[in-house]
Image (cartoon, rainbow, N blue to C red):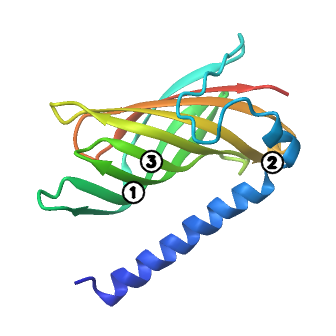
Amino acid sequence: MISPLRKASLMLFSLLFVSLLASSCSTKDSTEASNSSAPATSTSTVVTFGPTAETVTVEMPSVAKTLYKVGQDEDVTYGANQLVGSATVLGQPATVEILGSVNYLNGSGPFTGFLTVTWADASSIGFSILGTATQGTDGSSKIVSSMDYIGGSGTYVDTQVQGKFTATRSAEVGTPIMTELTLEVLQ
């Protein structure tokens, strides 16, 4: 049985997540959506980066998570996870945050969410992410995700950015991930 406090926090997180998802969908204009060559459900989007692309590695531990295990063997894990890490991104110290939801069978399966990079001056860039985690027999996971640029603020308010996101996890869902993030500012 779920406690009333936990149920309320789950409902609040769910509402926040749905609200963020809805706002990201409604702010994408129709020309941007019609220019996309990949279907919305694709997790294998190929992005070509130019000479100005930067790749950083970020260790991202969970700072908040609500994960449930269900099924006869508790082989299904679903829920939400917030991961946060720090790195130098585009030449400045920044915080990288992922708000994600997972639905895994035996540690593998789809996830969705948002990835945000925020700098000390409060400038930020945001992406929606859609990917897959594949768990190996040793419990480690490989994580691959497409990234769709939502927009930026501050220094990046009128900037287009493309990105690529991959990660690895050495243990079960909810433990830290080592993220490799490639970003390129287009304008």
Which residue is at 25% across, 55% downward? 76
Real-space CA distance between mark 1 and mark 3, rounded to the nearest whole angstrom: 18 Å
Q: Residues within 10 Å of mark 2 (few under 14, many from 20)?
A: some
- Quarter holding residue 54: top right
Quarter of the image with the N terminus is bottom left
Residue 62 position, x and y percent, is: 37, 52
Residue 11 horizontal side relative to residue 2, left or right: right
Earlier residue among tags 1 and 3: 1
| Relative side of 89 to 65, left or right | right
The quadrant in which the C terminus is found is: top right
Is label 1 in a helix, a strand or a loop?
Answer: strand
Write down the residue under mark 3. 111
At numbered mark 2, what does the secondary structure look like: helix, strand or loop? helix
Q: Is residue 174 visible?
A: no
Residue 126 visible (yes or no) = yes
Q: Residues within 10 Å of mark 3 (few under 14, many from 20)?
A: many
- The one nearer the camera, 39 or 185, is 39
Q: How many marks?
A: 3
Q: Nearer the viewer, mark 1 or mark 3?
A: 3
Dot 3 lies on which element? strand
**For marks 1 and 2 on the same chain, the one whose residue lies earlier in the sequence:** 1
Residue at screen point 42% across, 78% down: 9
**Nearer to us: label 2 or label 3:** 3
Name the residue at the left extreme: 73
Query: Left of 74 or right of it: where is 30?
Result: right
Give the residue displayed 19% in from the left and 36% down from the top.
139
Q: Which residue is mark 2?
A: 154
Identify which amino acid the numbered label 1 is placed on: Val
Res. 63 mark = 1
Q: Position of residue 71 (x, y in %)?
A: 18, 61
Q: Earlier in the sequence, mark 2 or mark 3?
A: 3
Vertical placement of 100 versus 69: above or below?
Answer: above
